[in-house]
Image: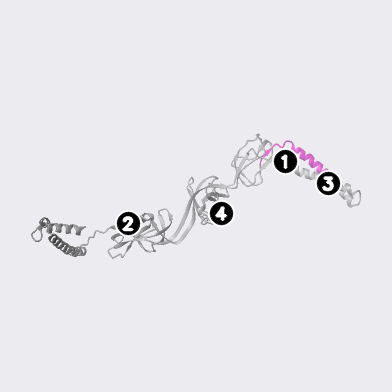
């Protein structure tokens, strides 16, 4: 631009002077094509000479001028490092030992033996229902069963001594077995009038109060919870089916508690939900302090991809052309005065994590990449590097 401006000024001066004494206007008014062409050839020759001289002057200025107006940039050294990519998803805490106990017998809830928050062990009696006289019936049946047993034992001794008939022995045996079966059935029926703990845990809630009429399988009585075997259930998009497997490391964050724990995937579902195209996973959760409760919301970060020698760069230094190709500027040919040449380098990107993106191709370990000022430089342009950083 500077050269063109000076050339035009000189051309105007020459034109105004006329060179051979005649002005340009006079030559044009003469109507002589030969004179006009001759004047033009004279001007072209003069312009070429001026351009040559300007180039010599610019070269001398560039050599003597110590303050060059080069674009100022900062750069960083690309370094290969371990890159762990994480899938972030939300899940809910759950436990398989969280149940509501229902009665198996119709009647009045005659007694509740536990309180809210009480620890119980497996098999412990929690509540009982009025048996409606079943215990008395059982007592009578046991008396009859004892009589049948005595009769059978005596008949058996006689039969072993070859006394009495075989039919008498068989009748006594059959009667004894029938009475014993009846007693067992009655005991089973009477057992339904009690509610016992199916596992060790904590009584979380007594839902039905003592004295209430309850119905078998319909009236909730007690909620029992065990917080030792906790896990997080989450739904994962099917595109991650090949990268999320059992044993994968998981970082679990509980927003309500403000706590983060390390865990692992313990189970991966074998069924893809056709409605939302997801599959379920379960993640073990350590719960020594018992702060983690069922239905608590958790945020999961699952390690679905790792690269031991990845090149990572900030996404802010990436540019894109009209064709959608992504590129960065790499500083090359750096001299002792931190002056270099910006070279446009096209790259192929991989996964992103936060503000960084993985570079699969285009940048090598140790390359100097332009960071600040990358938007203001052009391919092949000389640049001045203010600072070379090592990207962490």
In three-dimensional space, the C-alpha distance between marks 4 and 3, rounded to whole angstroms, equals: 54 Å
Can you identify the residue that label 3 sits on? 174
Q: Which residues are magenta?
A: 126-150
Label 2's element?
helix
Tell me which label, 4 or 2, sits earlier in the chain.
4
Can you identify the residue that label 4 sits on? 266
Label 1's element?
helix
Tag 2 near tag 1, CB within 8 Å: no
Q: Is residue 319 left or right of residue 7?
A: right
Q: Position of residue 234 (x, y in %)?
A: 53, 49
Tell me: residue 119, above or below residue 68.
Answer: above
Q: Residue at x 74, y 38 (%)?
A: 134
Can you identify the residue that label 1 sits on? 190
Q: Residue at x 91, y 48 (%)?
A: 165
Residue 149 visible within the image: no
Q: Residue at x 79, y 39 (%)?
A: 140
Residue 359 position by quadrant: bottom left
Mark 2 or 1: in front is: 2
Tell me which label, 2 or 1, sits earlier in the chain.
1
Label 4's element?
strand
For the residue pair 75 and 152, the one nearer the viewer reads as 75
For the residue pair 111 and 57, the one nearer the viewer reads as 57
Specify few, some or many for label 1: CA neighbours under 10 Å numbering under 14, 14-19, or 20 or more. many
In three-dimensional space, the C-alpha distance between marks 4 and 2, rounded to whole angstroms, equals: 46 Å
Can you identify the residue that label 2 sits on? 374
Tell me which label, 2 or 3, sits earlier in the chain.
3
């Amino acid at each position: 631009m500077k050269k063109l401006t000076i050339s035009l000024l000189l051309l105007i001066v020459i034109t105004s002077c006329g060179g051979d004494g005649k002005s340009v206007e006079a030559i044009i008014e003469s109507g002589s094509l030969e004179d006009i062409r001759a004047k033009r050839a004279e001007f072209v020759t003069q312009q070429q000479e001026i351009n040559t001289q300007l180039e010599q002057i610019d070269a001398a200025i560039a050599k003597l001028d110590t303050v060059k107006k080069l674009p100022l940039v900062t750069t960083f050294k690309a370094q290969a490092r371990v890159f762990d990519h994480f899938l972030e998803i939300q899940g809910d805490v759950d436990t398989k030992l969280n149940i509501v106990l229902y009665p198996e017998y119709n009647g009045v809830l005659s007694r509740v033996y536990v309180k809210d928050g009480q620890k119980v062990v497996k098999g412990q009696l929690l509540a009982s229902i009025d048996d409606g006289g079943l215990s008395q019936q059982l007592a009578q049946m046991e008396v009859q069963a004892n009589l049948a047993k005595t009769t059978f034992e005596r008949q058996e001794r006689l039969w072993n001594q070859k006394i009495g008939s075989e039919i008498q022995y068989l009748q006594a045996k059959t009667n004894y077995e029938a009475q014993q079966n009846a007693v067992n059935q009655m005991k089973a029926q009477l057992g339904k009038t009690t509610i016992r703990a199916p596992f060790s845990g904590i009584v979380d809630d007594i839902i039905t109060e003592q004295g209430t009429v309850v119905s078998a399988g319909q009236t909730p009585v007690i909620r029992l919870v065990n917080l030792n075997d906790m896990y997080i259930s989450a739904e994962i998009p099917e595109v991650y089916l090949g990268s999320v497997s059992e044993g994968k490391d998981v970082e679990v964050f509980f927003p309500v508690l403000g706590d983060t724990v390390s865990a692992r995937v313990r189970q991966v579902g074998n069924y893809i939900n056709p409605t939302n195209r997801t599959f379920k996973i379960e993640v073990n959760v350590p719960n020594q302090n018992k702060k983690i409760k069922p239905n608590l919301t958790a945020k999961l970060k699952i390690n679905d991809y790792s690269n031991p020698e990845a090149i990572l760069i900030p996404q802010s230094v990436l540019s894109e052309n009209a064709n959608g190709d992504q590129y960065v500027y790499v500083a090359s040919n750096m001299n002792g005065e931190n002056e270099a040449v910006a070279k446009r380098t096209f790259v192929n990107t991989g996964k992103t994590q936060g503000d960084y993106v993985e570079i699969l191709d285009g940048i090598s370990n140790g390359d100097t990449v332009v960071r600040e000022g990358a938007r203001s430089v052009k391919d092949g342009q000389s640049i001045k590097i203010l600072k070379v950083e090592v990207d962490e």
